[in-house]
Image: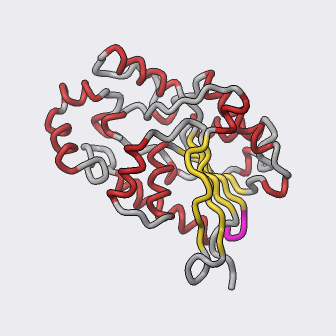
Amino acid sequence: MQQRWPDRLWIVRHGESAGNVARDAAQTAGLPRIDIAERDVDVPLSPLGERQSDALGRWFAAMPEEERPDVVLTSPYRRAMSTAERLHRTGGLPVAPADFVIDERLREKEFGVLDRLTRHGIEAEFPDQAEFRRLLGKFYHRPPGGESWCDVILRLRSALDTVSLHHGGRRVLIVGHQVVVLCLRYLLENLTEDGILAIDAAGDVANCSVTEYRFDPGAGARGGLLLHRYNVVAPLEEAGAAVTAEPDAAIAAR
């Protein structure tokens, strides 16, 4: 029987972005809006995010080539693509950027009217949305023009179908965003709303952290992916790169 899933699947959140830094500054200052000049899709890595990406690339480079990722899927957002490119540049990926699969289904959760607002800003400008979110919870709340976690999960179901259809038996790296990492865990581990929100509440997904699954032929009727590590930042710590775990720009809408 043909193997449906990859042999190994790594899911990496992008390195720290300029948006993460701006969001942290706005929260600290108690400002309603986050000062970002670019569209969210165009927000670059911060200098620290570049160092984090390079550190992770060196970690992958230390593996034998036959154990490194041989398929790379990335969000089209600049911070995710730049992370993947730096992994390649530091020797961590035998896959060239020209061969990356850029998949819009891996993009950041869309915040709609709440984009660039801090929690204070949302409560001041859209108190009805703050109340809706309190009542519905982040899993089901969809801000006007934006997405709920369920919406993200819907597109990620399709992305995982593509992975299983085209990349069975391969070693696959996905570079995405915090909510993408969490929602992929929800899908791959068949979690409940309470289960994934408990994981989320336990701590943010760190920038350039590694979540890894490995194929087990004894898992289910056709084998399956089992969690090997989650949110691991040891590659950054070993390289002396600071670990950051700021939520993405619209923290209250996440």
| Residue 225, magenta (yes or no) | no
- Place residue 52 in its image quadrant: top right
Q: Residue at x 51, y 51 (%)?
A: 106
Number of disc labels: 0
Of residues 209 and 110, the one nearer the viewer is: 209
Using residue 246 as the reference point, say whether residue 220 is left or right of it.
right
Residue 42: image location, x then y, percent: 52, 32
Question: The magenta stretch spans which residues?
Answer: 166-170
- Place residue 27 in its image quadrant: top left
Residue 12: image location, x then y, percent: 60, 45
Q: Residue at x 54, y 39 (%)?
A: 77
| Residue 169, magenta (yes or no) | yes
Q: Residue at x 73, y 30 (%)?
A: 239
Using residue 89 as the reference point, say whether residue 208 is left or right of it.
left
Whether 151 is drawn above or below 85: the answer is: below
Quarter of the image where the N terminus is located = bottom right
Q: Residue at x 66, y 53 (%)?
A: 173
Residue 79: image location, x then y, percent: 57, 34
